[in-house]
Amino acid sequence: MNIDKVFKALADINRRTLLDQLYLKNGQTLHELVQHLDISRQAVTKHLTILAEANLVIEVRRGREKLHYLNSAPIGDIYNRWISKYNHHRMEVLDDMKHQLEEENDE
Amino acid sequence: MNIDKVFKALADINRRTLLDQLYLKNGQTLHELVQHLDISRQAVTKHLTILAEANLVIEVRRGREKLHYLNSAPIGDIYNRWISKYNHHRMEVLDDMKHQLEEENDE
DNA sequence: ATTATATGCAACTATATGGTTGCATACAAG
DNA sequence: CTTGTATGCAACCATATAGTTGCATATAAT
C-alpha cells in the first residue's frame, strides 16, 4: 500500500466529503454521490478514481450503475504508520522552546 | 484551526520528512533541515512556511538563525475530528458488499 | 424498438504546486 | 570593518491538479 497516495487522496475537501458521504451511507452510486457535491459528474468520477487508487473506496459494477464502498483500512494504516507516533509525542514542544529561550538569555 | 491546511501540508513527502526530522531532533535551524533533503534551501523554506501556516511547525528567530519546533497538536486534531471515526468504522465494508451481491443474486 | 438513465472517455483550460536561480539583507566572527 | 554564514524576497518555470464540455456506450424501462 502506498501511504503517499492515501495522504494525497485525503488532501482534497471534495474527496473527504465523498468519504464522509459513504460513511453515512455505504454503497452509493456515482449518481447519488454527485448530488452531495457542487461539481460535475465527471469531476466526481475523477475524485472517486483517486480514492479507489488509494484503496479508500472500492468500486463494484452492478448493471449500469457503479456502487462505491468505503474502505477505512488505509486510514487505519496511516494512523498506525505515521500519525500515532506524533499523537504520543504531544506537548514537549513548548518545554523545548522554553529551555531554548532560557539558554538564549544565559548567553 | 484549519483542518484543510493540515491535510494539504501532510500531503507532500518532503514536508512529512521535515516533520519526521523535527521529531528526531526538535529545534533545528533551516540550514540543518536542508541537509536531510535533496532540494534547495529556498524550496525547504517554502515547505516550512506551509507547515507553519498549518501550525505543525513553530518558527522562532534566534539571532541570524531560525529554529523550528514540531507542534503535533494539529495532528491530534485531525485524528480526533476526522480519522478516529473511520478507525472505529472498520471492516463492515466487506459485509456490506457481500449483502449487496446477495441482493443482486436474488433479483 | 425506442427512449431514458448511468457511466465512460477524451480534449481542453485555469490555477496550484513544487521547484529553480539571482540578488538582498542581517547577524556573527575574525 | 571585512568576511562568512543564515536567512529572506522575488521572478520565473514545468508539471500536477481540479475542473469543464462534448460525445460515446451500455443497460434499464416503456
Image (cartoon, coloured by chain):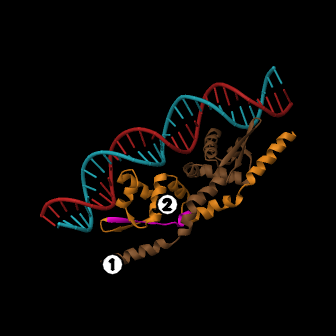
Chain colours: A orange, B brown, C red, D cyan
Quick one: label 2, few (<14), some, or many (20+) residues within 10 Å? many
For label 1, the SS is: helix
Q: Which three-letter amino acid code belongs to the residue tagged 1? A: Asn
Q: Position of residue B104 (x, y in %)?
A: 33, 75
Is D12 drawn above or below residue B11 in the view shown? above
Callout 1 touching callout 2 (CB < 8 Å): no
Q: Residue at position x 55%, y 63% from top?
A: A75
Q: Residue at position x 42%, y 58% from top?
A: A49
Report if residue A68 lies within the magenta region: yes
A12 left or right of A102 in image: left
Residue bounds of the magenta highlight: A65-75
For label 2, the SS is: loop
Q: Position of residue C16 (x, y in %)?
A: 50, 42
Q: Which three-letter amino acid code belongs to the residue tagged 2? A: Ala
| Label tally | 2
Name the quadrant containing residue B53: top right
Q: For the residues carrying marks 1 and 2, which lies nearer the camera in this image?
A: 1
Residue at label 1? B105
B46 left or right of A37 in image: right
Q: Position of residue A102 (x, y in %)?
A: 83, 44
C7 left or right of C21 in image: left
Nearest the viewer among A69 and B84 is B84
C-alpha gap between disc 1 and disc 2:
29 Å
Nearest the viewer among C13 and B97 is B97
Label 1 lies in what chain?
B
| Quadrant of the frame with the C terminus of chain B | bottom left
Residue at label 2? A54
A37 left or right of A101 in image: left
Do marks 1 and 2 share a chain? no
Report if residue B35 lies within the magenta region: no
Q: Is residue A45 visible?
A: no
